[in-house]
Amino acid sequence: MRSTLTIQERERFEVDGYLMAKNAVSRDQLTKLQSEIKIWVDESRQHTKPYGEPTIDGRPRFDMGADHTALKPALRRINNPSDISESYFQVMSDSKMVDMVAELIGVNVKFHHCKINLKCPGANTTVHYHQDFAFTPHSNDDVVTALLLLDDVTEDNGCLMVVPGSHKGKMYSLYDGKQFIGRVDDATETFLKSKQIPVVGSAGDVCLMHTRLAHGSAPNKSETSRGLYICVYTAADAVPLAKNPMPSPNEGLIVRGEKQISARMINFEVELPQQPKSASFFTVQGQESATGK
């Protein structure tokens, strides 16, 4: 495998917990991904509540926010698009993006799950602060979330906000008492926002993010779409400690290197998540889906 990241980029990832890399997919790959997004957004106009061929745990594949209408669609989540699209499967399994991940967590890499988080123009969708590891804990934290930019991403259209270096700190609770709410409490969110920086870039770039990095994002206040194809990868010797919140027939697929026969453990303690029963985690964070009423 040829090197796709410089030594300086790998060092920056270790320090900051994230890295922006240019041109993670080919122009042809990006065009195909964008074309399918347009089709799915147009399709969502015909629906008034979450819909689509169910995922393997029986939930709708497509989820819209409560502000969704035919004239102003608010499609916000597509669960495991690699299950239903050859183009999305190809990028997930064999693109330059996957090579980049392998350079960060080792030559043996497996797929965990993927989704599209979409903010249509003017959409109210918010991602409250959290750490991905709390949703997908593993025996070790060589887990990377690759967020491929499907559009040019700016602060105006709801870019990712991150707290550099937070992957080396504490795991924040995503519980309110005994209820799993999928987000930190208000005081912690205020603290994290005081340290956040925006992650912006051009369509085709990728943000490679450590699973323990604290992050969130604001609504889209612009007239341009903000789409992210989000693929989660783990070292092949990282074993899940909880059920996949977005199970797929491709879960555990070795995308680089070889399958491992042992689990690598690190010394840590992490809360165990409660699995969502709704179409997407946005409802877990308190943002209702379209109801069809």
Image: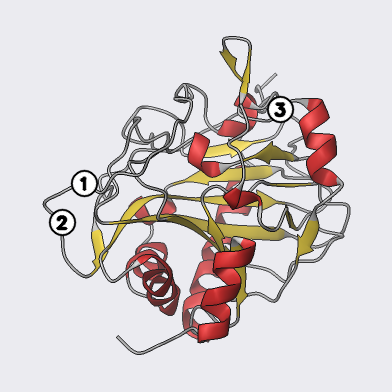
Q: Secondary structure at mark 2?
A: loop
**Residues tagged 1 and 2 counted as in contact (Cβ below 8 A):** yes
Q: Earlier in the sequence, mark 1 or mark 3?
A: 1
Residue type, numbered disc 3: Gln
- Disc 3 from disc 2: Cα separation: 39 Å
Question: In the image, is residue 208 above or below residue 129?
Answer: below
Image quarter for residue 159? bottom right
- Mark 1: few/some/many CA within 10 Å (<14, 14-19, 20+): some
Residue, far top? 178
Relative side of 33 to 64, left or right? left
Indicate the position of residue 146 as horizontal and vertical percent values: 51, 61
Number of numbered callouts drawn: 3
**Residue drawn at 80 percent across, 59 percent down:** 197
**Where is the C terminus found, in terms of image quarters?**
top right
Relative side of 35 to 56, left or right? right
The residue that label 2 is drawn on is 260
The residue that label 3 is drawn on is 287
Q: Earlier in the sequence, mark 3 or mark 2?
A: 2
**Residue drawn at 49 percent across, 35 percent down:** 135
- Disc 1 from disc 2: Cα separation: 8 Å
The residue that label 1 is drawn on is 263
**Residue drawn at 51 percent across, 50 percent down:** 211
Indicate the position of residue 11 as horizontal and vertical percent values: 55, 75
- Is residue 135 in view from this perspective? yes
